[in-house]
Image (cartoon, rainbow, N blue to C red):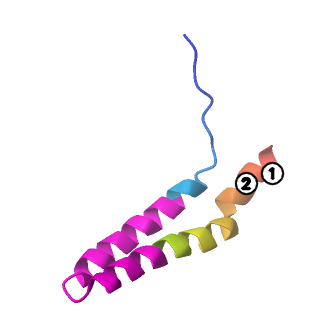
Amino acid sequence: MKTKKRNKDKSSWITGGTTMMGLGVGFILLKYSVMYFLASLLIGIAVGLVVTPFLPIHYKSAKQS
């Protein structure tokens, strides 16, 4: 039985998590405007992409390689 190599870098989880937070805020703001919903979703994605390189999780995996 073959085992898959798992990627230990969890940086994609941070982008996904902030996207889900933006989606949650967007659902709250959806009653005001659809544009607020889209804006909060895009802000969630952007925050995840900006924050990910600065986290120590990223540096630990790079040092071990």
Q: Residue at x 30, y 72 (%)?
A: 24
In the rendering, at what x and y percent does residue 64 appear?
79, 45
- For residue 47, which quarter of the picture? bottom right
Please tell me how many numbered marks the rendered image carries: 2
Q: For the residue marked with disc 2, what is the amino acid?
A: Lys
Q: Which residue is mark 2?
A: 60
In the rendering, at what x and y percent does residue 3 appear?
57, 20
SS under mark 1: helix
Q: Magenta span: helix, strand or loop, mainly?
A: helix
Whether residue 12 is in magenta: the answer is no
Q: Is residue 15 left or right of residue 31?
A: right
- For residue 56, which quarter of the picture? bottom right
SS under mark 2: helix
Mark 1 to mark 2 CA distance (whole Å) = 5 Å
Q: Residue at x 25, y 75 (%)?
A: 27
Pointers 1 and 2 in contact (CB under 8 A)?
Answer: yes
Q: Residue at x 59, y 69 (%)?
A: 49
Mark 1 crowdedness (10 Å alpha carbons): few <14, some 14-19, many ≥20: few
Name of the residue lying farthest toward the left: 31
Q: For the residue marked with disc 1, what is the amino acid?
A: Lys
Name of the residue lying farthest toward the bottom: 32
Whether residue 39 is in magenta: the answer is yes
Q: Which residue is mark 1?
A: 63
Q: Quadrant of the C terminus?
A: top right
Q: Which residues are magenta?
A: 14-43
